[in-house]
Image (spheres, rainbow, N blue to C red):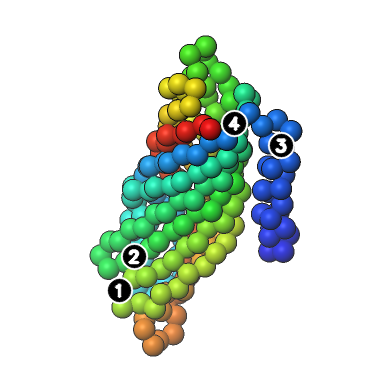
Amino acid sequence: MKSTFTRLVLATPLVFGAATAAHADSNFAGLTWGQTSNNIQKSSALNANLNHPNFDSVINNERTWGVRAGQQTDTGRYYATYEYISGSNKGLKLRQQNFLGSYDVFYPLNETGTQLFGGGTLGLVKFEQNSSGISRDSNISYAAGLQAGLLQDVNQSVSLEGGYRYLRSNASTDFAPHGESSLGSLDLHSSGQWYLGANYKF
């Protein structure tokens, strides 16, 4: 299963590249800023040992920033994104980094450059646990999701957008005090992100 997914992730940029080579319109790069909330699932051992700790509150509406680059045509776009999120609450600290490849389809609303967009995303998530008094642990796993939003051209080179992305993952980390055995594990089940972005075409 993992080897199949690895081949899929590695093949995705090649598919994107082949398609954009045939239909390339313009390159673009951009920045995003938003808020992310996570759905953290805990093992039964961790719930029993720590009396049902609330890890969902650690990354809850935390600020998220990202950078992206890709190619855009009249009908859609292909792009790669890096995103960074971290949060802490009552001594619990989590960090998430997303490495994503996405494709969006455009649906024009008018002649002034306003478009709806929607598409899919594949990539990797690095999930890290670095709570106070706990051994640091991290895991890299798959990410798959959907996104949708509104894109507005400001001029021929600049566009603004707002959107929402939902990601599923199976990244997991152990929760073990320094020098002791694990008390249980955390699973990053899903992430939801509202964001604003600015893009520059060249």
Q: In terms of image quadrants, where is residue 25?
A: top right
In the foreground, 105 or 159: 159
- N-terminal-most mark, 2 or 4: 4
Nearest to the eye among marks 1 and 4: give it: 4
Q: Report which residue position mark 2 lands on.
A: 93
Q: Report which residue position mark 3 lands on.
A: 21
How many C-alpha atoms fall within 10 Å of the one at disc 1: few (<14), some, or many (≥20)? some
Q: Amino acid at mark 3?
A: Ala
Q: Report which residue position mark 1 lands on.
A: 132
Alpha carbons under labels 2 and 4: distance apart: 40 Å
Q: In terms of image quadrants, where is residue 58?
A: bottom left
Q: Amino acid at mark 1?
A: Ser
Alpha carbons under labels 1 and 2: distance apart: 7 Å
* Marks 1 and 2 in Cβ contact (< 8 Å): yes
Alpha carbons under labels 3 and 4: distance apart: 11 Å
Alpha carbons under labels 1 and 3: distance apart: 49 Å
